Image: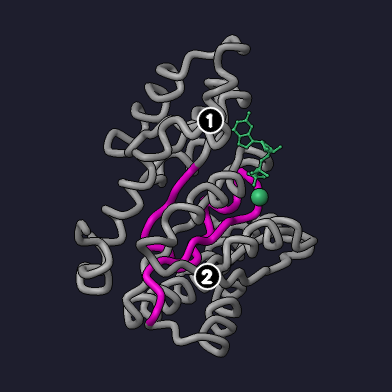
Amino acid sequence: MHQTFDAALGINLLHANQKGADRNRAHFDEWGITCFNIMSSPGAGKTALLERSLAVLTDELKIAVIEGDMTTELDADRLRQYGVPVIAINTGRSCHLDSKMVAGGIHQLEHQYNPSDFDLVLVENVGNLVCPAEFEVGEHVKVALLSVTEGEDKPLKYPVMFQEADCLLITKIDLAPYLDIDINRIAANVRQMNPHVTIIAVSAKTGEGLENWFDWVKSQVLNQHPSATATEMLPA
Ligand SMILES: Nc1nc2c(ncn2[C@@H]2O[C@H](COP(=O)(O)OP(=O)(O)O)[C@@H](O)[C@H]2O)c(=O)[nH]1
Ligand SMILES: [Mg+2]
């Protein structure tokens, strides 16, 4: 069967992106950095989660953020208030970050700081449930957010994002009582296609579930680069 021109182009594009992602990951590994790619539809609560996370996790981990948005530095400015380096990447008309854009962010980090000082780079991807799932940026860990306001069926309708995720955060659970939504059904829909995913229900508003998320983040950092964090993460 003949491949269509578009399919061939798509495969080449993804192949080139993958090579760039592998290079980015090699840099992160060289510096002992764990990289998270945080993805969701617009408004699911990525930046709110990062605000809460930076407020707590910076006590134990040295963190930098790469903030992807089509335009503006609104989210980047929100996160700069937590005293961490935030590298803003505007993607223009593109609906996702790609590995080349993130390589540019890594270059800035390297230029302005000593990258070996960092334990964790959090990448907030452009809000979109489709394309970010296809374009790796060099992450070790993929995190997908789905807010309770989006509906139980979304994992079934946008499967790639949820199949690929290492962690699913069901967000805005403080709103669940006002909605006709079953959080267990969301979890079951995701488990059906991704049996090993870690599922954590959280509210950035009330703080419910955030301790579980923080513990999971720390376990992933230890898992990827045990020596980089061994001292900081020992109990006091
Ligand atoms: N009620 C409630 N609202 C939230 C929560 N998390 C985020 N929001 C609100 O949802 C909107 C979008 O959040 P934001 O973090 O900007 O989403 P992003 O586009 O995924 O980065 C904002 O108005 C937030 O205040 C939550 O846990 N509960
Ligand atoms: Mg945001």
Start-end of magenta stretch: 117-144
Q: At 22% across and 70% down in the image, what residue appears?
A: 231
- Residue 145 in view (yes/no): yes
Ligand 1 within 8 Å of disc 1? The answer is yes
Q: Which quadrant of the figure has residue 91?
A: bottom right
Q: Is residue 209 left or right of residue 90?
A: left
Q: Is residue 200 left or right of residue 37?
A: left
Q: At 56% across and 90% down in the image, what residue appears?
A: 111
Q: At 48% across and 57% down in the image, what residue appears?
A: 37
Residue 69 position within the rendered picture, expressed as x and y whole percent measured from the top left: 70, 59
Q: Which residue is mark 1?
A: 206
Q: Residues within 10 Å of mark 2 (few under 14, many from 20)?
A: many
Residue 190 position within the rendered picture, expressed as x and y whole percent measured from the top left: 40, 30
Q: Which quadrant of the figure has residue 195?
A: top left
**Residue 17's mark?**
2
Outermost residue, bottom direction? Answer: 111
Q: Is residue 206 magenta?
A: no
Kindly state the secondary structure of the residue where label 2 is placed. Answer: helix
Q: For the C terminus, give its image quadrant.
A: bottom left
Q: At 62% across and 59% down in the image, what residue appears?
A: 79
Upstream in sequence: badge 1 or badge 2: 2
